[in-house]
Image (cartoon, rainbow, N blue to C red):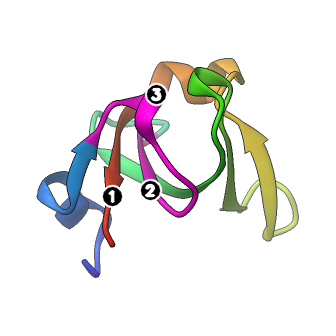
Amino acid sequence: MPRSYSEFKNFGKEMPIDSVKIGDVLLFLCLTRNVIGHIVIFTNPNGMGNDFIHSCADCEIKVIVTSLKKPGYTRRFVKAIRIL
């Protein structure tokens, strides 16, 4: 596994969002810059309605489940990759 977010850009096999499976990884742009800044693990197949787990520094630094439908994530979505 890559050590930094930037190394994920060319890592794994890119998948169409409608083909992701549980355990695939979704990459998102950083909130303030045009670089990969957030990586999540896919948990529920449903196209752009996919759910994923991720750590959330804004919510008391805990792991939460979020939907890709949330506008903040939809706008920042880069790609889905399969690692295993």
Looking at the picture, how far across and down is residue 7, in whole percent?
Answer: 18, 66
Which residue is labeled 2 in the image? 25
Looking at the picture, how far across and down is residue 55, in whole percent?
Answer: 68, 65
- Mark 1 touches mark 2? (CB < 8 Å): yes
Please report the residue visible at 21 percent of the width from the left and 61 percent of the height from the top.
Answer: 12
Quadrant of the image containing the N terminus:
bottom left
Q: Is residue 54 above or below residue 50?
A: below
Mark 1 or mark 2, whichever is nearer to me = 1
Which residue is labeled 1 in the image? 82
Where does the magenta region start and end? 15-30
Looking at the picture, how far across and down is residue 9, in whole percent?
Answer: 19, 52
Residue count near mark 3 (Cα–Cα under 10 Å), binned few <14, some 14–19, many ≥20? few
- Please tell me whether mark 3 sits on a helix, a strand or a loop: helix
Mark closest to the chain's N terminus, 2 or 3: 3
Residue 68 is tagged as none
- Please tell me whether mark 2 sits on a helix, a strand or a loop: strand
Task: Tell which of 34 and 71 is nearer to you.
Answer: 71
